[in-house]
Amino acid sequence: MMEDPDYKRLVVNKCKYFNMREVCEKAGINYSTYRGWKNNGRSFSDEKAKILFLTMKEICEKSQK
């Protein structure tokens, strides 16, 4: 069985390529919750990180069409 990727690390590594306010809005995640996690180390669930990552991936796939 394959292990789930580290979505939090993936989001942190890729966020510089995205307008994260738009990504959060599209993902249905409060932007201030995301910022609090990224900048201040507040708690952020793996599930939310996964949703953000998948939303970022979706945006990339749409932009390539």
Image (cartoon, rainbow, N blue to C red):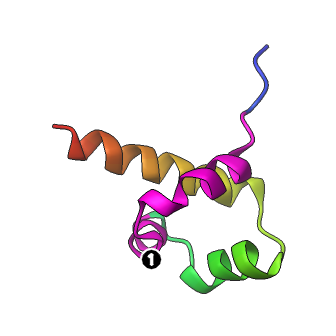
Q: Which residue is mark 1?
A: 21
Q: Residue at x 65, y 57 (%)?
A: 12
In this view, 8 is above or below 6: below
| Residue at horizontal 66 percent and vertical 60 percent from the top | 48
The stretch in magenta equals 5-26
Q: Position of residue 38 (x, y in %)?
A: 71, 72
- In the rendered image, residue 2, in percent from the top left (x then y), is placed at 75, 18
For disc 1, the neighbor class at 10 Å (few under 14, some 14 to 19, many from 20) is some
Residue 53 placement (x, y as % from top left):
55, 50
On whether residue 53 falls in the magenta region, the answer is no
* Quadrant of the snapshot with the N terminus: top right
Q: Is residue 61 above or below residue 41?
A: above
Badge 1 element: helix
Q: Main secondary structure of the magenta part?
A: helix
- In the image shown, does 20 or 54 lie closer to the viewer? 20
The residue type indicated by label 1 comes to Arg
Residue 49 placement, left or right of 23: right
